Image (tube, grey):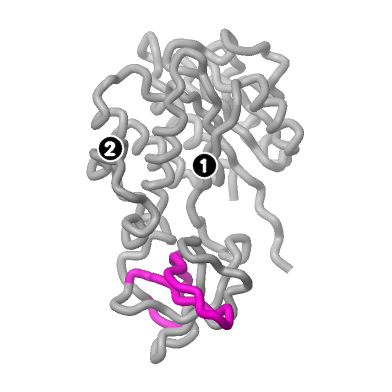
Amino acid sequence: MQVAKSKLSILVPSSFAQEVRDLKIKTYKIGQLARASAVFRVDEIVVYRDEELDESRLIELVLKYAETPQYLRKLLFPMKKELKYAGVLPPLRTPHHPTSSSGVGEIRPGVVTKVEPDGSAWVELGFERPAYLPEPKGAKEGERVNVRIFSLTPLVVERVQKDEIPKYWGYTVRIEGNLTSTLKKMRKEGMYIIGTSKYGDSVSMEKLVSLKDRGDLCIVFGSPRKGLLEMVERNMFDAVLNTIPNQGTETVRTEEAIFATLALINVMRE
């Protein structure tokens, strides 16, 4: 029986890239968010709406594009002006972004390209030919699936659920309402909510170790122009931590705070 792993979610504002106007630089900044999330095994990125600037749809689109293996992008993302500078996105190089095939037993993300009348399907895996999926259990054309290769000649696969995969398999993205309503929703989902602020408690190894028994964690980041405690009351959080004590700069950019915070959280995660 597989032991359930604790979930790690991060909350970022829809104004995440507010400090820049150029779409190319915005795309790059969002790419840094994607990269940090992949490096530190974030399971879910939640974009909450900031009244100062709502670019939630752009953030969601770029994050999802970055998370998708390169060989599936043309199938899942039609040409859009918002993706004009997708070439500046850093490669994630996660296990679900394979650069070669390891053969039978390999698990790969794919896209269902055709469903036969008997319910079987064909799946694009980035090879020269599609793979046959004999028991798709209700697969639909255009659906993204995870499959395990169990035959190369012919190329045949079986469906695998994400929670059955032992390796880090990317993040999901969703958009929610304002910060207050989003925090209330995360609370109902049973998350232990940690706010990040220079006015929070200085992080220590003791505090980090104590998080190990808190179950699912939700790390919340403020906007480029407003700290969390300017946006909501402190009692909305289970803890408020200063993850960059004695900072050497007047301000810390959101993407910098994300890298610094996730690096510390990673110390106590298995």
Kindly identify which numbered label has been placed on residue 38: none
Q: Quadrant of residue 120?
A: bottom right
Q: For the residue labelled by badge 1, is the local secondary structure a helix, a strand or a loop?
A: strand
Rendered location of residue 252, percent (x, y):
40, 17
Q: From this view, report whether residue 137 is shown above or below residue 60.
A: below
Q: Residues within 10 Å of mark 2 (few under 14, many from 20)?
A: few
Q: How far, Cα to Cα, is label 1 from label 2?
A: 20 Å
Rendered location of residue 29, percent (x, y):
33, 31
Rendered location of residue 27, percent (x, y):
30, 34
| Of pointers 1 and 2, the one earlier in the residue sequence | 2
Say which of 131 and 231 sits in front: 131
Q: Which residue is mark 2?
A: 81
Say which of 91 and 78 sits in front: 78
Q: Which residue is mark 1?
A: 173
Q: Quadrant of residue 2?
A: bottom right
Residue at the spot x=52%, y=46% of the render? 172
Q: From this view, report whether residue 119 is shown above or below residue 168.
A: below
User: Is 118 left or right of 260, judged from the image as shown?
Assistant: right
Q: Residues within 10 Å of mark 1 (few under 14, many from 20)?
A: some
Magenta part of the chain: 102-126
The N terminus lies in quadrant: bottom right
Residue at the spot x=39%, y=26% of the render? 256
